[in-house]
Amino acid sequence: MTKAITATEVDQTDLPERMATEKHPRAIRWMHWFNVPILTVMIWSGLRIYWSYDVSRVPSIRFGEETLFPEGFYDVLQLDRKLARGMAFHFSFGWLFLINGLLYVLYLAASKEWKHLIPRFADIKKIPALLLHDIGLRKEAPEQGQYNVMQQLAYSGVTVLGFLAVATGFAIYKPVQLSWLTSIFGGYQSARLIHFIVTMSFLAFFVVHIIQVVRAGFGNFWSMVTGYELEPADEPVLEKEVADV
Ligand code: HEM
């Protein structure tokens, strides 16, 4: 049996201290989580293709014919074979990556969610204060919206990386039919190098992103799953249903 009682009758420790606020729209969450397996397959299959010719050489720059990864790297990850399989996965998941990325950008534009992501000049000026706060030399974190300025830079940066990955990908996928695109990136070899650097930047983003997510705590991670984040409640709860024991 339950009965309603007023807040004054309840022990303060019984009152809910937090309330849920909506943080991430459903569409963003779906596209975000879709991106994780898609990008994993893209990097895995891309490295399989890279293995078949892992010399990075741009004729106009010339920095030798050194290979970046030692043989053992491909051995351990078992990437040193099955080039055709790598290509098949890369060229099919690439379309999923493109469609998901396009939908994300369209959604950001249509829903005005991009306003959370793109830093304004006033936000850029907060970088020193934020860095001082992060290394413990400043008590108060500067005011922020949904994301702080470093997150805004990382998230808008990774969206640009996605665009570059697709553009350089097409430049080296169809260098004859899309020769205009290939030449924008300085020719086939340099488009290939930029494509590779973009991949490594995705990996660097990923490492920093995971560190940030772990530092921000489980509630922040869970908000990307459920859409809601728990925040301290401002309003006092006037009536509460409690079990009558
Ligand atoms: C297992 C891997 C991942 C986890 C656990 C994770 C977790 C999260 C979380 C918790 C947020 C919300 C941050 C906040 O509210 O402060 C977020 C946002 C974001 N993540 Fe990830 N993420 C992962 C992989 C990725 C990957 C692979 C990418 C893209 C390369 C990515 C790109 C983004 C972007 C762009 C946002 C901002 C989304 C928006 O609000 O529009 N994440 N992620």
Image (tube, grey):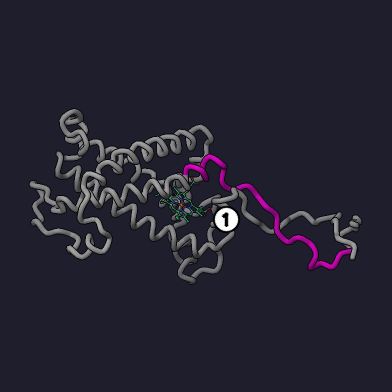
Residue 201 coordinates in the image, percent (x, y): 31, 53
* Quarter of the picture holding the C terminus: bottom right
* Pointer 1 residue: 222
Note whether 185 is above or below 73 in the view shown: above
Say above or below: 180 vs 93.
Answer: above
Label 1 is placed on what type of residue? Trp
The percent position of residue 69, horizontal first and vertical second, equals 20, 61
- Image: magenta residue range: 9-31
**Image point (59%, 59%), residue name:** 219
Q: Quadrant of residue 222?
A: bottom right
Residue 107 visible, this angle: yes
Q: Nearer the viewer, residue 100 or 201?
A: 100
Find out if the beta carbon at label 1 lies less than 8 Å from the nearest ligand 1 atom: yes
Frontmost residue, 209 versus 244:
244
Q: Is residue 192 above or below residue 63?
A: above
57 inside magenta stretch:
no
| Residue found 51% across the figure and 52% down from its top | 147
Q: Residue furthest top?
A: 177
Using residue 118 as the reference point, say whether residue 244 is left or right of it: right
Is 193 left or right of 119, judged from the image as shown?
Answer: left
| Element carrying mark 1 | helix
Residue 185, percent from left and from top: 20, 39
Residue 175, quarter of the rendered image: top left
Q: Residue furthest bottom?
A: 137
| Residue visible at 20% across and 53% down in the picture | 81
Image quadrant where one finds the N terminus: bottom right
Q: Nearer the viewer, residue 82 or 100?
A: 82
Q: Which of the two residues, 110 or 82, is positioned nearer the viewer here? A: 82
Identify the image quadrant of residue 74.
bottom left
Query: What residue is at 41 percent from the left and 49 percent from the top?
Result: 37
Q: Residues within 10 Å of mark 1 (few under 14, many from 20)?
A: few
